[in-house]
Amino acid sequence: MGLLHFLQTRSGFKVDNRKTTSAATLTLRQSLWPLCLVTILFFLWGFAYGLLDTLNKHFQITLGITRTRSAGLQAAYFGAYPLASLGYANYMLRHFGYKSVFIMGLVLYGIGALCMLPAGLNRSFGGFCAATLVIGSGLGSLETAANPYLAVCGPPKYAEIRINLAQAFNGIGTCVAPALASYVFFADTSDDVDALKSVQWVYLAIGIFVFILAGVFFVSNIPEVTDEDMASQVASTHAGEQEQPFRKQYKLFHATLAQFTYTGAQVAIAGYFINYVTETWPGTGDSTASKYLAGAQGAFAVGRFIGAFFMRYVKARWVFLVYLSCTVAFIAASTTQGYKTGLAMLFLTLFFESVCFPTIVALGIRGLGRHYKRGSGFIVAGVSGGAVVAPILGHVADMRNNTGFAMIVPTMFMIVAWTYAVAVNFVPAYRDTVDKTGESDVGLQAGGGVPKEDVEIGAMGRSKEVVIHRKEITM
C-alpha cells in the first residue's frame, strides 16, 4: 500500500493546457529540485555530443572512410532533431507534458546506445549511423522539453541565467567525452576490432545509466507548466506576441534560422577540430588532438559559467551580441592560421560560442505565451543545422585537402546567425518584447510562489487550478 500511495502522489502524464497551475509561479527555491534533475540531462547529451566529435575521426581510421562520409554521423544525429522537435516529441509535450517527453527521450537514448553493440560487432558504419539516429531522436526529444522547461521553471527574470548554467553542465559533458576518448578510442592498438570494442563498452554503460535515470524521472514530481500558464504570464507583461497567430511570429522564425546556422557551424567546427589540429600542426597525433579538443570544450563550459555571471548584471541580449561577434572574428581568423595560433583561435571560438545556443532559445521564445511549446519546438529543430553544415565542411576539406581553409564554411553560417544578435539588440520590435518579458516579477514578489504541497498538486493537473477562458487563436 505504501508503494501504491507513493506512485499515486507522483506527477502524472496528462496535461490540460486550458488550465493554470501553481507551477507557473515557482520561486527559485521551489524550482531547485526539478531544475537539478533536468540539468543531468544536459550533461548526458553534452557527453553524447562530445563522443560524436571523436567518433568522427575514430571511424576515419578504423573503418577507412573519408572525411565527407564520416560526417554521416553528424547528419544522422542532428537530422533526427526536427523529427522529434516538430513531430512526435512536440506532440507529446503539448498533450502529455514535460515528464512524458523526458522519459520517452531517455528510453530512445538508451535504445540507441545499446544498438551500438551490434553495429560494432559487424563493423558497420551504416549501423553506427542508424544507432546514432536513434540516439539523436532521444536527445532531440529531451532537448525539445528541457530547454523550454528551464526557461519557465522559475522566475522569468532569470531564464537566460538558468538555461546557461544548466547548459554549462552540457559543456562539461562535451569536455569529459573527448578526454575519455583520447584514452579509450585512440589507445595504442593495431587491432581495429579491439578499437571498435571500446566504443561498444562505452555505449553499453551509457545505455544502462540512461535507463536507470528514466526510472528516476518516472517516480519524481515534475511540475507541469501549461499553455494557459504562459498566456497569463505574458499577459501580465503586455508583451502581446501571443495575440498574433503563429504564422506571424516572425521573430521566432528569425531565431530558428539563427539556431540552424549557429548550431550547424558549431557542430562542423567541433566535428573537424581534430582534423584541423593534425593538419595545421604537423607532428600532432590524433590522441593529442583529442586532448586539445577536450581542453577547448572545457573552455566552452567555462564560457557558459562566465556568461551566466555577466547576465546577472548585464542584459542577456548584450552578452549574446558580444560573444557571437567574437565567435565570428576568431573562427574567421582560424582559416588563415596554423600551429599554436590556429589552435588558440579555435579555443577562443569555442569559448565565445558557449552562451549562443541557450541564449537563442531563451530570447527566441520570449513573449510567445500560448504559442510557447510549439515555438520552442521550432527553435530546437534549428539544431538540424548540424546535419547540413558538417558535410559541407567535410566536402570542402576533401576537395582542397585542407581543413583549415574549409573553416570558411562555418564562418559564413556564423555571420547569418549574427544577424539575430544584432536584431535583438537594435530592432525595437525584437528588443522590446525581450525586455518586457525579462522584467516580469513573477516568482520574485515578497512571499511569492506557492506552498510545496500546492506545487505537487499543481504538477498533477489536479486542484489549485482555475480555468481561464480565452479567445482561441487560429492559424
Image (tube, rainbow, N blue to C red):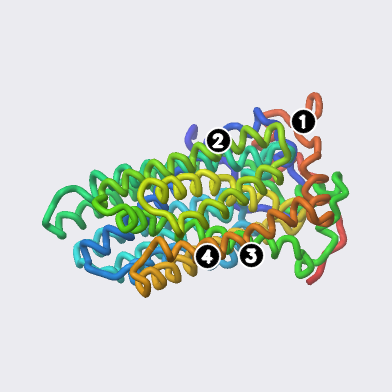
Looking at the image, tell me whether mark 2 or mark 3 is earlier in sequence order: 3
According to the picture, the residue beneath numbered tag 2 turns out to be: 305
**Marks 2/3: CA–CA distance:** 25 Å
Nearer to us: label 1 or label 2: 2
Q: Give, as a three-letter code, the residue at label 3.
A: Leu
**Marks 4/2: CA–CA distance:** 25 Å
Q: Give the percent coordinates (x, y) of residue 205.
A: 30, 46
User: In this view of the protein, which residue sits in the foreground, 97 or 413?
Assistant: 413
**Marks 3/4: CA–CA distance:** 11 Å
Q: Few, some or many C-alpha atoms within 10 Å of disc 3 (few <14, some 14-19, many ≥20)? A: many
Residue placed at 30% from the left, 43% from the top? 180
Q: Are marks 2 and 3 in contact (CB under 8 Å)?
A: no
Residue placed at 69% from the left, 58% from the top? 420
**Marks 1/3: CA–CA distance:** 33 Å
Q: Give the percent coordinates (x, y) of residue 129.
A: 35, 67
Label 4: state its secondary structure.
helix
**Marks 1/2: CA–CA distance:** 23 Å
Q: Is residue 407 left or right of residue 114?
A: right
User: In this view of the protein, which residue sits in the foreground, 381 or 310?
Assistant: 310
According to the picture, the residue beneath numbered tag 1 turns out to be: 444
Q: Give, as a three-letter code, the residue at label 1.
A: Leu
According to the picture, the residue beneath numbered tag 4 turns out to be: 384
Q: Are marks 3 and 4 in contact (CB under 8 Å)?
A: no
In the rendered image, is residue 160 in sight? yes
Q: Give the percent coordinates (x, y) of residue 67.
A: 33, 67
Label 3: state its secondary structure.
helix
Residue that protrudes farthest toward the top in the picture = 446
Label 2: state its secondary structure.
helix
Nearer to us: label 3 or label 4: 3
On residue 257, the disc is 3
